[in-house]
Amino acid sequence: MSQEQKLRIQSKGTRPSCPSRPENTDLSTVTEGQNPNPPRGQTIEVEGVYIISVAARILDMHPQTLRKYERLGLINPGRTIGMLRLYSTEDIKKVRLIRYLSDELGLNLAGVQFALAAFDNMSLLNIGS
């Protein structure tokens, strides 16, 4: 048996090992320049984030609706390095508010945009007092 045949038999079914990522590293919540591994004894507060398909399922709406809301500037989900949308719990609450304003109160999306801007301005004024 030649040396080449021996190498083929030995390597058959094996793959080179690659280092694995540390268990508690969630790269979606790490900002540029931030260390994903906290010092010993400290923990990172992790907020729930959902990709668009999961967020759409939670909200019982089509993912395209979420994309439309983003295009109109009604919501601004975070993004991963690979540009996947990440919806936070705050984004989910805001979409529920948008749905309430449009479905229950009958506002069109321009009206929803105006109402959200007014709400944000009122919130800023209350913070300053």
Image: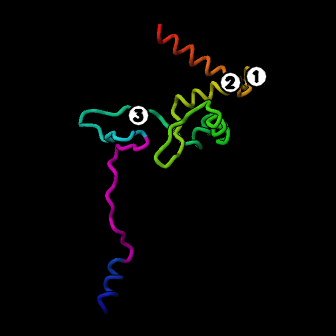
Most foreground residue, 89 or 108: 108
Q: Residue furthest bottom?
A: 1
Q: Which residue is mark 3?
A: 46
Q: Circle 1: is it few (<14), some (14-19), or many (20+) Cα within 10 Å?
A: few
Picture quadrant where residue 100 is located = top right
Q: Amino acid at mark 3?
A: Val
Instruction: Give the mark nearest the N terminus, 2 or 3.
Output: 3
Q: Residue at x 38, y 41 (%)?
A: 32
> Does the magenta stretch mainly form a helix, a strand or a loop?
loop
- Distance, label 3 to label 1, CA atoms, is 36 Å
Going 57% across and 19% down the picture, which residue do you hit? 120
Magenta highlight range: 12-28
Amino acid carrying label 2: it is Val
Residue depth check, mark 1 versus mark 2: number of the one nearer the observer? 2
Q: Do the residues under discs 1 and 2 have CB atoms within 8 angstroms?
A: no
Q: Dot 3 lies on which element?
A: loop
